[in-house]
Amino acid sequence: MQQTTHNISTDHGHCHLKLVNFKVHDNHTSHETQGLSEKQLVVRRGKPFKLSLLFCGRLWNPHTERLVLEVWLGSLSERIPVQFGNKWSDLQHWSSVTVHICSPVLSSVAVYNLLVHIETKYNRKSYAVGSFVLLCNPWLKDDPVYMPLDAQIQEYIKSDYGLVFMGTNLNVRSRPWSYGQYEPGVLEACLRLLQVSPQHLSDKDKDYIRRADPVYLSRVVCAMVNCNDDLGILEGKWQGSYKDGVKPTDWSSSADILHHWVSSNYSPVRYGQCWVFASVLCTVMRVLGIPSRVVTVFNAAHDGNANQKIEEFYSSTGEKLNLSKDSIWNFHVWVECWMRRLDLGAEFDGWQIVDPTPQEKSAGIFCCGPCPVGAVQQRCLGVPYDTPFLYASVDADIVQLIVRDGLVVGRRMDTESVGQLIYTKSIGSDSPENLTSTYKSKKIRSCVCEAFQEEIQKDFSSPEGMSPGLEVSLSINGVPTVGESISMSVTVTNQSSNPRVLMEYLNAQLKEYNSDPQKSFWKTHREVHIQPHEVLTLKHTIPPSDYESVMADDDIVNLAVVIKDVRTEERVLDTKDFNISSPQITIEIEGGDSIQMKKEHTVQVSFTNNFTKTLSGAVLTVEGSGLLKGKQEVRLPLLQPGKKIEKRMSIMATSPGTKVLMATFSHSNSPTVISRSLHKVSVVAA
């Protein structure tokens, strides 16, 4: 990239600056910023970059003239006198020099303007030569975001592809996501996000100065990913119609969302949910040079009243009731960002939780974190930011209450389920890495449990004189798949020396991952006789005909069993949430999954009807950011059992990196998409 300079003042007796060569290719290679921008020089702080200055006019006189570079950020500026060895090359009446510029390691992330001054004792010639982008430098030891291992930097900074884990801890599903930091315009969108933040709009210079700190940057970006307080990127929606926007499950690319936001003049993009908010935050942080990864907590507690307990209410027949302000999400997705916590001390360095999903306010705005993962593990609840809320997310206790006619008739304390599984994508692999032990300390947990012991015994002890009680556990057999019966087992243990007559109530309700269940779609009850100290296993199945008309691809089932002793009216409860595996959509790229940029490749997408019934109004849809323009669709009025619907199309990648093709299948018998498949495509430069 060569830029002709803009001449601010003119004096023909001087040596003139004619051209500045920003050495973009060399600098981008040296600074590991290849592909981030075609328009601007992008460099990392604390590392030198070079410029070539080409002069014309009369020859340079080193005795009477000096060269000064000036860097501007808003109204802040820094002058850098250029020190010369014997590096001038004389080309007749032209002279050129290569200048090396190195920013301090704690410089602010921003777009800087560069001026060149040729000064004498009596006057000065000034040239505005252009701008450059300065990012954090995880390769540099003195930078607070320094990451020691190349494999980590490759995964958490350079990779433009990730996986989001979803579903339930019994049936974890993964979904590819294209972070898209090398897509045209994405870097510019991330920088623009900083410029339209409330912090920048209210005090530009203060914001510029504070942008040197990754803790500050992560809070600003976290708040800006949701639109609740500002000109932020995404509007959240968790129920109702999505017709005036895009359903959250239809996104698979941060670049698409950032392009929407910029092109709409910073109007919020509709709609996001937790994994969409987190994935966009991960993109912005990686672009700014802060190592980041998307993390899923299975059975995440949302503790609105900050008492570290979640109450759940069930009817005496096992129906979950919507009576609590607190809730358990089957999964919740946030981001971990890597940085030294210069504000806290070395024990809290490393991964920090940053959660952009708007739930609770932090210092008056909808953002959460950065909170050291170590502070959560060690239960240091006074450490900023938002540690009590995040601790409860992974370690709250669940108090389950059975209610009848307004009275509590049974109780159960669950200290195990919350935060049972915490996953992120493994380095260099699509398998999950289990992070649970980095969040949860067994030693700390046992101390907390001891502290609650008296309270638990007081609340949960049996009435005096009652014989030893009942135990019940509920399990799902195998991984349920659409079109097949759901099989489950209820194990009942009679701990007493007496035979008992029991009533067994089972109830299944549909639910979304983050909300209380809807009305029951299946229930059963029966009388059971059990002998002293006997362990009974009761088998049940839910046939496809009982759930197919109400269930869609992303739905989860809340299953509960209540066992009641007919004589004593003692009641015990167990619950399980599970998701159903979708039928598969096949995506095949001719010649394999690695394709050349700007070259057409053929893709075949197909879905086979494995149901026992004919599906009407079948629709197969394919889309892919950076691969396809718009959606490709094929429709069939009827799809007989065993028959296939398919679509052939051409794809062409516009930039290198990892892209995601997404195919969905729906039909008019079902309320929404019944199957979704995402396929990773590696794009190499031609």
Image: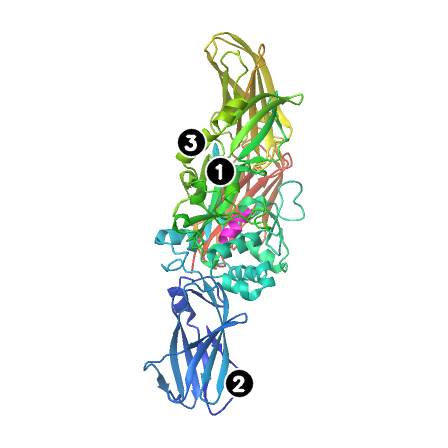
**Mark positioned earlier in the residue sequence (1 or 2):** 2
As shown in the figure, which amino acid type bears the numbered disc 2? Ser
Secondary element under disc 1, as helix, strand or loop, is helix
Sequence-wise, the earlier of marks 1 and 3 is 1
Corner quadrant of residue 205:
bottom right
| Spot occupied by residue 416 in the image (x, y as percentages of width and height) | 47, 30
Highlighted magenta segment, given as a residue range: 276-283
> Neighbour class for label 3 at 10 Å: few (<14), some, many (≥20)?
few
Q: Give the residue displayed 42% in from the left and 44% down from the top.
A: 374
Write down the quadrant of residue 671 in the picture.
Answer: top right
**Residue 155's spot in the image, x, y percent?**
41, 51
Give the residue pinned by disc 2. Answer: 9
Q: How is the image coloured?
A: rainbow
Residue matched to label 3? 446
Q: Quadrant of the C terminus?
A: bottom left
Q: In this rendering, which labeled residue sits more in front, label 1 or label 2?
A: 1
Task: Assign the magenta stretch its main secondary structure.
Answer: helix
Which badge, 3 or 2, comes first in the chain's sequence?
Answer: 2
Q: Residues within 10 Å of mark 1 (few under 14, many from 20)?
A: many
Is the residue 78 above or below the residue 630 in the image? below
Q: Is 279 in the magenta?
A: yes
Label 3: state its secondary structure: helix
Estimate the spatial distance between the alpha carbons at disc 3 and disc 2, rounded to whole Å. Answer: 73 Å
Specify whether 322 is left or right of 465: right
In three-dimensional space, the C-alpha distance between marks 1 and 3, rounded to whole angstroms, equals: 15 Å
Q: Which residue is mark 1?
A: 394
Going by the numbered disc 3, the residue's amino acid type is Ser
Residue 176 versus residue 169 in the image, above or below? below
Q: Compute the Cα span from label 1 to label 2.
A: 62 Å
